[in-house]
Amino acid sequence: PRGADQMASVGEDTNAPSSSSSANAEAGGKASAGSKSELKALWPFIIISITYLLFTVTDGAVRMLVLLHAYNKGFTAMEVAVMFTLYELMGAVTNLAAGVAGAKWGIRATLISGLLLQIVGLGMLYGWSDDWSKDEAIVYVTIAQAMCGIAKDLTKLGGKTVTKLVTPEEKQERLFKLVSALTGYKNSLKGVGYFMGAALLDWSYFAAISVNIGFIIVALPFAIFGLTTQLGRVASKNITLEAVFKQSGNINYLSLARLFLFGSRDLWFEVPLPFYLRSAEGLGWPRAAVGALLAGYIIMYGQCQSYSPQLVLVPLKQSPPNKWVCILWNAVLAVCPIFMGAMALTSMYDEQGDSNTGKVVTLMIGVFSFAIIFAVNSAVHSYLVVKYAEGNKVAINVGFYYMANAFGRLTGTIISGALYSYVGSNVNDGLAACFLASLGFVVISTVVTFWINDDEGGLRCGGNLGCLGAPPLKDRDGNNETRRVGDIEAGPLSGARQ
């Protein structure tokens, strides 16, 4: 019997590895199949991200090319603002049309169209002649910028909607991280474009245009060969212009808040700040330095946006954010234009150039503080729009929302040109007026956000402070919360690998 027991034991030991090996092989096969399935599901996101990010470099570069080239030719801030009007206006119109076109013909069609139009807009800038009058140049460049504006929003539609299309409805945490990552890295590369445009302009205006066209040529094959024609298409009964304007209350209010939020930035950033940095009465910096500072702003803004899950969700214990998080960061943002406007009216700004350290330091503190706080606001907004979007009309919802974004930028740009050019007796008065107008826009954006119907979860400021109906932390699902925070702390792209 003892020998039999030993034999039985040996038999069991002999069979165990075989059974374990079989189970491991089966598990490995399932894991491999799951990885392939996940890669296939995320493939549109990968392809569109590559294309969108390459395009974004040229979007930042062309802005600096036009602005600094016009400054060198003696155009005023108001005249340069006019050059950008059709860029923003056509962007607003395009967002409406692109939402319908994306839903009807698919995101691939809108993406390819945007890339081709960017080549047209950039190519037109070859023809900007020194022999033209100011009026002729303004008309021509404005039309070229209109092409780039249409291109930007046709391309942006794919980048903003694909995150929703590849994310299951129940994985809001993953959606927030995908949106934050793509939007953040997009803005960082736009900053690279700002610097590239300014630096290349010191080398050659025509070479700068050619390099940017090269970026688009590299991006085109990804869009042409990497996407299907069905991505983003919906049933034809949902595709009407009337449907574009029939948005939910949350989309309408968020869009209006977005209009004033982005208007608050462009009231001083797009035209007045570069002019002030270049002006002898301002800081008197060379083109490369102006491009570097604006690039630094955009890159910092983009990186903060990429890591906004850590900046917002972990400290506030808000997972994912709701309207109260949006209101909180809007209110914090108001401090920046108050500070910058007040500083611009002090006597230390009266000294011309950058010899006054206090003048330079206070301006940099205000600018980069705005970049950090604005990044969190923008990330929360970008997440909320895809959260509120209807699954079968996501392209239309997002198109409508970014139409409001474009109108905000248009409004801010035009008002900024007028304020900087005509308010007060010097550039400091004009710059201060732009900052104070920015404050007004931030306040309006904050008030509008109150009307959004998204109160669930209240507002938390860390583990001990909760208000507006925030549930106690002990009532949360501990396992899920641990997993969420762990995912967030792993980095902004960890959601793409879930």
Image (tube, grey):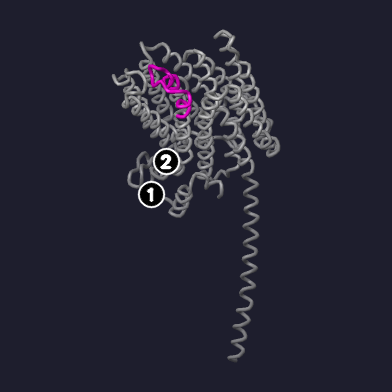
Q: Is residue 217 visible?
A: yes
Amino acid type indicated by mark 1? Leu
Q: Residues within 10 Å of mark 2 (few under 14, many from 20)?
A: many
Residues at circles 2 and 1 in contact by the CB criterion of under 8 Å: no
Q: CA distance from mark 2 to mark 1?
A: 16 Å
In percent of width and height, residue 355 lies at: 34, 23
Task: Judge left or right: residue 113 versus residue 413.
Answer: right
Q: Residues within 10 Å of mark 1 (few under 14, many from 20)?
A: some
Magenta-tinted stretch: 272-292
Quarter-of-image position of residue 330: top left
Quarter-of-image position of residue 372: top left
Task: Judge left or right: residue 193 versus residue 466.
Answer: right
In percent of width and height, residue 447 lies at: 40, 27
In magenta segment, residue 277: yes
Upstream in sequence: badge 2 or badge 1: 2
Circle 2 residue: 312
In percent of width and height, residue 131 lies at: 59, 9
In what element is the residue under mark 1? Answer: helix
Q: Nearer the viewer, residue 188 or 283?
A: 283
Amino acid type indicated by mark 2? Val
Q: Is residue 96 visible?
A: no
Q: Residue at x 56, y 22 (%)?
A: 92
In what element is the residue under mark 2? Answer: helix
Q: Nearer the viewer, mark 2 or mark 1?
A: 2
Q: Is residue 47 above or below residue 355?
A: below
Q: Is residue 71 above or below residue 290?
A: above
In magenta segment, residue 476: no
Task: Judge left or right: residue 365 versus residue 161.
Answer: left
In percent of width and height, residue 418 lies at: 44, 13
What is the number of the mark on residue 473?
1
Residue farthest front in this picture: 203
Q: Is residue 301 above or below residue 478?
A: above
